[in-house]
Image (cartoon, rainbow, N blue to C red):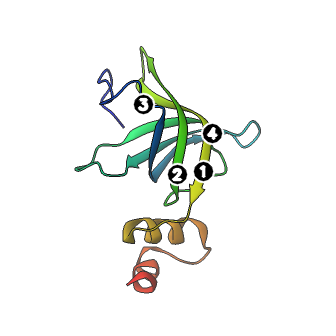
Amino acid sequence: MAVKGNKPKDVHAMEIAGRVDAVIMKNEENGFAILKVKPRGEGGTQHVSIKGPLSHINVGEEVECAGCWQSHLKYGWSFMVTDVNVTQPISHVGLVNYMEKTIPGVGPALAQKIVA
């Protein structure tokens, strides 16, 4: 997540793509969710919050989102998603996270062995 109050590099960006690393909240009834995404091409550990109709998305999945940046006094900057395309994870970390979160009985150790 971007630090509260810090603006994204480009507040006019209309797209963001990356790997989902955490689900902050999910409402299955209305489909709304808030996720933490590691943007593609970003070095370090910088994450951004994305929100919108995302309850069908799981940790480890890769997403390509269209939308706009919004600033909230309490929560800081987040990306409000209007359209999302979910792609299969392509990185080692993404595959491991995806397997352990979506396949019953597969934990971190087994996922690491399968992906290795």
Q: Which residue is mark 3?
A: 13
Q: Which image quarter: residue 103?
A: bottom right
Give yes or no for contact between labels 2 and 1 (Cβ–Cβ under 8 Å).
yes
Q: Which residue is mark 2?
A: 63
Q: Secondary structure at mark 3?
A: loop
Q: Residues within 10 Å of mark 3 (few under 14, many from 20)?
A: few
Q: Nearer the viewer, residue 18 or 113?
A: 18
Q: Which residue is mark 1?
A: 85
Q: Is residue 41 left or right of residue 96?
A: left
**Amino acid beneath label 3:** Ala
**Image coordinates for residue 10, horizontal then vertical, percent:** 34, 28
Give yes or no for contact between labels 4 and 1 (Cβ–Cβ under 8 Å).
yes
Q: Considering only order in the chain, which callout, 2 or 4, is on the residue closer to the N terminus? A: 2
Distance Cα–Cα, label 4 vs label 1: 7 Å
**Amino acid beneath label 1:** Asn
Q: Residues within 10 Å of mark 2 (few under 14, many from 20)?
A: many
